[in-house]
Image (cartoon, grey):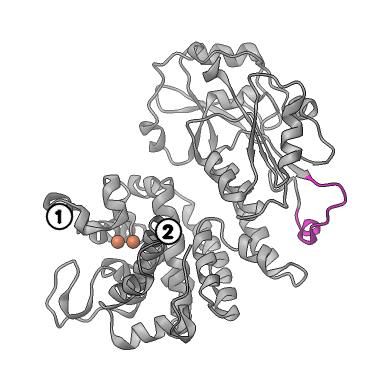
């Protein structure tokens, strides 16, 4: 039965190995889902529509770094068991610094590994499971996000049967949470089926425990960046959990090593500030933002570029990460509940009505963030003004003489640059030069010069991918 399949995701660069797994006996319910590259793995992981019974990751997978893949798994599949898959005799210099358990990985397997062994490890408790057994009257995902202290996990994800890394809760109709399992326990098939047939579609874990694993991933990421024994490519791949594209483009365009290292460090520090930020209760718009991958990634990418620019502009102030990092991260918070079409920030694609809503997003972001008192006035002003351009152009409306703050200018340039990268990625035939020049036309000549020197040293617009 098609819809009862729960594939095993195998992230490994060796296609013949993955093929060999599928050659012998394969249980129809647990086919192998191969990914030989990091970004592909992340795509599968973030596709919440398709269940997975287990995740196996070879650290030698090219593309996004393996820690990023594991982080992505914790983010989207907190209840699915993760294993590291190692080539016999392979040495990973960073391995000695990584505590596999703290990373939320069950175990490390060294090849040869066969399919049967993998399935045995996942110990699926319900071998044949028909999706129709789930009563469809369960709660809609929308109201799942109301309580930001808990993360909803599809009940089916627990069919893997291995013991849970954290306490598991069920939500009662009174919006209270009842603990079902302690960390280290597993569901029995009967118990799980009972819940499913009662219409329970989601179980919950506390957000803070998920954050523990994700922060450890970030911690490892910054530690790896400091290692001399680790090659630049590994560092590059690891330095960004989300805005990987940005790093790749920066490297392609010949940005200096010093600036590149700065970008990595900046993102690492930003993560620390974000962890602190995630604590406490969140307004709805903010939790919507934090679970919106497009906007979140856009935020990470923008703050990274802003960080590098801030460095180039020698921005004063004791804490550029707090100001530029958070302003860059949250500048589009006001779009979190806006229609998808607005998230590309392309006004020409919007109707006049939509434009009006769109132009309100800087104000809405500030309105929400000001109440939290976590961002400084400079950061809030940067967000408020991030679409203001030279001579009174842009929005929100103001008179032509009103100056735009340096922070706003930096966030605005970074934002334009990130959007330009996306456009070129979608359509590589677009002339880069025209796009960048257009993006820079709204800023002072001096700022545009610093921008070019930083990101396109020698004024060479080489290429984007
Ligand atoms: Fe914006
Ligand atoms: Fe933006």
Q: Which residue does the image show at 47% across and 74% down from the upper left? A: 462
Res. 187 image quadrant:
top right
From the viewer's perspective, tell me whether residue 194 is left or right of residue 421.
right
Q: Which residue does the image show at 36% across and 65% down from the upper left? A: 420
The residue to which callout 2 is attached is: 425
Start and end of the magenta stretch? 86-98
The kind of secondary structure element at disc 1 is: helix
Q: Residues within 10 Å of mark 1 (few under 14, many from 20)?
A: few
- 117, 395: nearer the viewer: 117
Quadrant the N terminus occupies: top right
The residue to which callout 1 is attached is: 356
Asked if disc 2 is less than 8 Å from ligand 2, the answer is no
From the viewer's perspective, tell me whether residue 358 is left or right of residue 304.
left
The kind of secondary structure element at disc 2 is: helix
| Cα distance between the residues tagged 1 and 2 | 28 Å
Q: Is residue 116 above or below residue 300?
A: above
Q: Which residue does the image show at 55% across and 67% down from the upper left? A: 269
Q: Is residue 218 visible?
A: yes
Please check the rendered image and state whether residue 91 is part of the magenta-colored stretch, yes or no: yes
Asked if disc 1 is less than 8 Å from ligand 1, the answer is no
Q: Position of residue 207 (x, y in %)?
A: 53, 42
Q: Nearer the viewer, mark 1 or mark 2?
A: 2
């Amino acid at each position: 039965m098609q819809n009862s399949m729960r594939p095993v995701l195998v992230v490994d660069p060796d296609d013949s190995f993955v093929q060999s797994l599928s050659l012998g006996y394969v249980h129809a319910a647990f086919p192998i889902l191969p990914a030989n590259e990091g970004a592909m793995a992340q795509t599968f992981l973030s596709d919440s529509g398709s269940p997975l019974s287990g995740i196996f990751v070879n650290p030698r997978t090219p593309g996004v770094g393996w820690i990023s893949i594991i982080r992505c798994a914790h983010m989207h599949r907190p209840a699915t068991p993760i294993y590291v898959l190692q080539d016999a005799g392979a040495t990973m210099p960073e391995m000695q610094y990584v505590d596999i358990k703290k990373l939320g990985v069950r175990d490390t397997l060294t090849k040869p590994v066969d399919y049967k062994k993998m399935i045995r490890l996942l110990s699926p408790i319900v071998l044949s499971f028909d999706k129709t057994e789930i009563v469809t009257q369960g709660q809609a995902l929308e109201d799942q996000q109301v309580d930001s202290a808990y993360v909803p996990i599809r009940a089916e994800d627990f069919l893997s049967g291995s013991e849970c890394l954290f306490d598991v809760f069920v939500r009662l109709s009174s919006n209270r949470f009842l603990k079902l399992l302690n960390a280290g326990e597993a569901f029995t098939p009967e118990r799980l089926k009972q819940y499913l047939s009662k219409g329970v579609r989601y179980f919950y874990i506390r957000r803070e425990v998920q954050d523990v694993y994700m922060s450890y991933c970030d911690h490892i990421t910054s530690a790896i960046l400091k290692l001399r024994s680790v090659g630049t490519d590994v560092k590059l791949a690891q330095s960004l959990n989300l805005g990987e594209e940005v790093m790749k483009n920066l490297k392609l365009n010949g940005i200096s090593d010093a600036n590149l290292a700065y970008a990595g460090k900046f993102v690492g520090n930003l993560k620390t500030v974000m962890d602190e930020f995630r604590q406490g209760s969140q307004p709805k718009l903010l939790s919507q933002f934090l679970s919106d991958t497009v906007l979140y990634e856009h935020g990470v990418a923008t703050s990274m570029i802003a960080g590098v620019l801030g460095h180039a502009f020698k921005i004063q102030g004791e804490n550029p990460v707090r100001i530029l990092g958070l302003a860059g991260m949250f500048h589009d918070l006001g779009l979190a509940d806006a229609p998808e079409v607005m998230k590309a920030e392309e006004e020409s694609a919007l109707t006049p009505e939509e434009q009006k809503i769109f132009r309100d997003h800087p104000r809405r972001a500030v309105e929400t963030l000001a109440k939290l008192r976590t961002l400084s006035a400079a950061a809030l002003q940067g967000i408020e003004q991030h679409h203001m351009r030279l001579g009174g152009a842009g929005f929100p409306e103001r008179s032509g003489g009103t100056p735009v703050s340096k922070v706003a200018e930096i966030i605005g340039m970074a934002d334009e640059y990130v959007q330009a990268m996306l456009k070129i990625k979608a359509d590589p035939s677009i002339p880069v030069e025209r796009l960048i020049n257009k993006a820079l036309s709204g800023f002072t000549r001096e700022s545009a010069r610093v921008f070019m020197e930083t990101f396109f040293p020698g004024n060479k617009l080489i290429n984007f991918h």
